[in-house]
């Protein structure tokens, strides 16, 4: 795992912690993100902690008592981390308005930052045109809640792609600018990955200690390597598609998915395969590589989507 991802996960964990947590607890919550060797894991943690402190993050550390006597606990106090009231000069406020307008962090945080420095009363540039967004840095306010549910072993419930989900959270991971929740989906009795920003509405949690994370679970190891397994916001009614592949390309698909993906074989040598389609956009790109040598048979919604997609491309050609 890249250090930036691990440090981001550590920052979120320490921000959401309601009490000081020990290194062992941090290592357990971020299972698979630190080396298995204890000495190497401790060294990596110290580097991460130093990096955060060098960036001005106030990590509070205390020596614990009770059954954790002598251990050091860590936590980021929001009162020290979050920005207090500031007094800016007019030109400084104007510069900050431009920065907030051109870099979007989440859906409302930029606006709240403007309120914090009282920029709503500032005049605009005079032309009524807002600066063009130069970067989009997604931040989801449900992350601390999900981290707490993960730490306390609470089952979470939410809406995803129009369906009610009841999930045992096993891990949270930041990849390619997005946050993913990995856990056991009780509604289908299977391990699934959910992109946090695709969750609809609020997340609800049950009582603590409702489940145990499987021994040796490594969120980085189970995170899908195939982009077609990563969820998006297009619901086609199934997570696996049946695709008829021409005989000339059967060997290619077998090398990708193995014989266990074979659904049926036809007399002309063509073969029907079960192909992941949780991420419909990634599935589209995979299918396009076969041109006319592959055909989607099921589910019907995916077949309709592919037909519409190909016709729209033909209309633009």
Image (cartoon, rainbow, N blue to C red):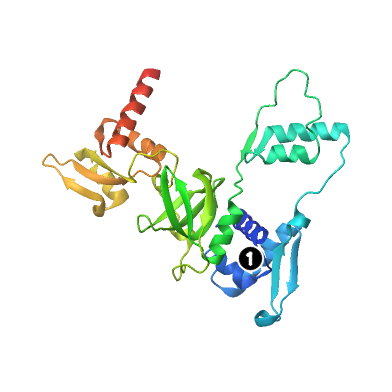
User: Residue at (56%, 69%) from the top-left corner?
Assistant: 28
Check disc 1 and report the residue beneath it: 44
Position of residue 149 relative to residue 129, above or below, is: below
For the question of whether residue 188 can be seen, the reply is yes
Crowd around label 1: few <14 · some 14–19 · many ≥20 (10 Å): some
Look at the image and tell me in which quarter the C terminus lies.
Answer: top left
Q: Residue 80 in the image: x percent, y percent?
A: 78, 57
Residue 23 in percent (x, y) is at 64, 71
Q: Residue lying farthest left?
A: 267
State the image coordinates of residue 262 (x, y, percent, origin top left).
22, 49
In this rendering, is residue 287 above or below 189? above
> Which residue is located at x 61 percent, y 55 percent?
144
| Mark 1 secondary-structure assignment | helix
Considering depth in this image, is 2 or 135 the residue closer to the camera?
135
Between residue 32 and residue 14, name the one nearer to us. 14
Horizontal side of 254 relative to 309 (left or right) equals: left
The quarter of the rendered structure image containing the N terminus is: bottom right
x then y, percent, for residue 95: 80, 33
């Amino acid at each position: 795992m890249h250090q930036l991802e691990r440090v981001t996960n550590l920052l979120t964990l320490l921000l959401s912690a309601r009490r000081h947590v020990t290194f062992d607890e941090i290592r357990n919550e971020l299972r698979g993100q630190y080396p298995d060797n204890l000495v190497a894991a401790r060294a990596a943690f110290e580097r991460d902690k130093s990096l955060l402190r060098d960036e001005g993050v106030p990590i509070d550390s205390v020596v614990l008592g009770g059954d954790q006597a002598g251990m050091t606990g860590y936590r980021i106090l929001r009162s020290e981390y979050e920005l207090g009231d500031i007094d800016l000069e007019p030109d400084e406020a104007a510069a900050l308005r431009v920065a907030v307008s051109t870099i979007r962090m989440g859906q409302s945080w930029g606006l709240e930052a403007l309120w914090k420095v009282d920029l709503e009363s500032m005049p605009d540039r005079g032309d009524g045109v807002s600066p063009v967004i130069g970067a989009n840095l997604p931040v989801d306010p449900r992350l601390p809640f999900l981290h707490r549910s993960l730490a306390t072993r609470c089952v979470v419930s939410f809406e995803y792609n129009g369906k009610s989900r009841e999930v045992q959270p096993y891990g949270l991971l930041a990849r390619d600018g997005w946050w993913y929740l990995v856990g056991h989906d009780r509604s289908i009795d299977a391990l699934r990955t959910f992109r946090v920003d695709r969750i609809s509405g609020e997340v609800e949690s049950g009582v603590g200690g409702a489940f145990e994370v499987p021994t040796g679970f490594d969120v980085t190891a189970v995170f899908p390597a195939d982009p077609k397994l990563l969820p998006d916001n297009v619901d086609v009614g199934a997570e696996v598609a049946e695709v008829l592949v021409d005989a000339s390309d059967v060997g290619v698909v077998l090398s990708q998915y193995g014989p266990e993906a074979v659904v049926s074989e036809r007399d002309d040598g063509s073969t029907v395969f079960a192909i992941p389609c949780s991420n419909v956009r990634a599935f589209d790109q995979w299918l396009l590589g076969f041109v006319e040598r592959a055909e989607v048979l099921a589910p019907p919604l995916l077949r309709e989507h592919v037909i519409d997609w190909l016709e729209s491309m033909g209309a633009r050609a």
